[in-house]
Amino acid sequence: MSSLTPKSSDLPNLIARQLVAQPQCFVLFGSTGDLAKRKIFPALFALFLDKKLPSRFFILGLGRKTFSDAEFQKHVEETLLLFARLKGDAQTRKEFTQKICYLSLDIDGDYTPLKTLLLDKEPQFGTRANRTFYLAVAPSYFTKIPNNLKSIGLLHEKEFDSFANIIIEKPFGTDLPSALDLDSELKKILFEEQIYRIDHYLGKETVQNIFAFRFSNHFIDHIFTSQFVESVQIVAAEDLIVGDRVEFYDQVGCIRDFCQNHLMQVLAFIAMEAPSKNEAEFIHQEKSKVLRSIKQIDAIVRAQYEKGYINTDAVSGYRDDARVKDSNTDTFVAMRLFIDNFRWGGTPFYLLAGKALPRKYTEINIILKKAPFSLFPQSSQQNIISIQIQPKEGISIIIKTKVPAKTSLKPVKLDFYYDDYFSTESIPEAYETLLFNAMCADRSLFTDKEELMASWELFDPIITKWKTESLTPEEFYPAGSWPEIMNKIFLDGHYLVL
Ligand code: BG6
């Protein structure tokens, strides 16, 4: 299928790429919402400060509320002061906000005012009718908005010179059938190449660094096989309770909020083969291939937090919120799976994610096999390659060394931390990278349809089963602790590396 975006051979690389955003209008549906406030405007502002936004560029904020352009610009400036990573000075903020206009639009209604405004502003800003539409709205609008845009002629036909791309937030569907339905509805009006599905984990610098770490250090990738790796653990632990988002969270649970998307994307980066070219479509092919090599989730457990203490703070249990008092929703999931291919056959992958756990961290631990026999008194600690995504970004390797003047061994750590080599300011927020890449029409860091469906296929039977089953007493854990039930997924001799 031909596309409105550059051909893959013109697309820049995931690493070492020189991306340049074409002139364009960034149309933001949901511009007065929380995501816009906390993530999207701060990210756009950071790109502006970094001189990555095209000079011919403007932002059109859409929302239900009524604002004049000046009022909305002021609102964005206040937002930046509150939430932006880089706050700039008053003059720079003003220069940025002058690129913003606002339109009050009923997203269920008539889009003529949007069309009129775009056609009026585009020549003024010289954006050549290139449009990036960001849908920071409820998933129920994911087909409605593109349909409305299409019917009024704002999504270009493929032979048109300009591009019109759409960025969609997760969740993309709530199960396999709904994801397939959503995809087929979107494909009636858009090409796959026009759809940018966000998984913000792919925007994290350290997640992208997995790709660099493996494929630019040949000796590392060489040992990423079942010959050397005993097991892989991917842990995304949060130390907060669900809080205000409980009504949304109750519909999805940890399995859809975290596992089906973020954990599987990280897994794909850890386990994929090197793409034959460092370009979006080849990267997507390799990620899909590895996800398709997982025939099923081998073992999975869920749990829900009860009241407890996180650090020293007393917190209430999930069901203590009257809105979800009978809920069986999972706030913790742990699973074991195998990748049935030549590289990974036989190596268990353990994936764990949840809320209200003892501390917040995201980490991948690759536990290496012991030496075939030992010339030294054994130390029980194995070699581990630990990739730390957050809170401190880095990579550590645990090796064993001889204790001076003794015959015994001691595990020591070879550490690389980003802040030892780079200024922490230079590490962009995930949304900065993702928005910039979308504006440059580079889809490497977005989820493509095949990956997404492969992942839904794995989780769909579990979601269906859990829907009909009530939680048992062993499926609860005091907030601030690791659920004991997680031990069921570990094979003999394996345990969570803490
Ligand atoms: C979101 C989930 O996708 O990721 C949230 O919906 C979760 O429930 C968040 O808290 C975690 O993101 P991060 O970047 O803080 O690990």
Image (cartoon, helix red, strand yellow):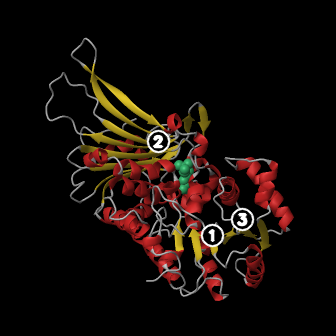
Question: Is 398 positioned to the left or the right of 67 in the image?
Answer: left
Residue drawn at the location 55% of the way across and 37% of the way down: 308
Residues packed near mark 3 inside 10 Å, few (<14), some (14 to 19) or many (20 plus): many
Q: Is mark 3 within 8 Å of ligand 1?
A: no
Residue 468: x, y in percent? 42, 63
Residue 160's place in the image compared with 479, above or below, is below
Q: Residue 32: in sight, yes or no? A: yes
Q: Residue 461: in sight, yes or no? A: no
Residue 428: x, y in percent? 58, 50
| N-term mark: 1 or 2 | 1
Pointer 1 with pointer 2, Cβ within 8 A: no
Pointer 1 with pointer 3, Cβ within 8 A: no
Q: Secondary structure at mark 2?
A: strand
Residue that numbered label 1 is attached to: 135
Residue that numbered label 2 is attached to: 477
- Number of the label disc, if any, that sits on residue 299: none
Of circles 2 and 3, the one toward us is: 3
Residue that numbered label 3 is attached to: 31
Q: Nearer the viewer, residue 71 or 1?
A: 1
Question: Is 118 positioned to the left or the right of 418 in the image?
Answer: right
**Residue type pointed to by label 2:** Tyr
| N-term mark: 1 or 3 | 3
Residues packed near mark 1 inside 10 Å, few (<14), some (14 to 19) or many (20 plus): many
Residue drawn at the location 56% of the way across and 53% of the way down: 430
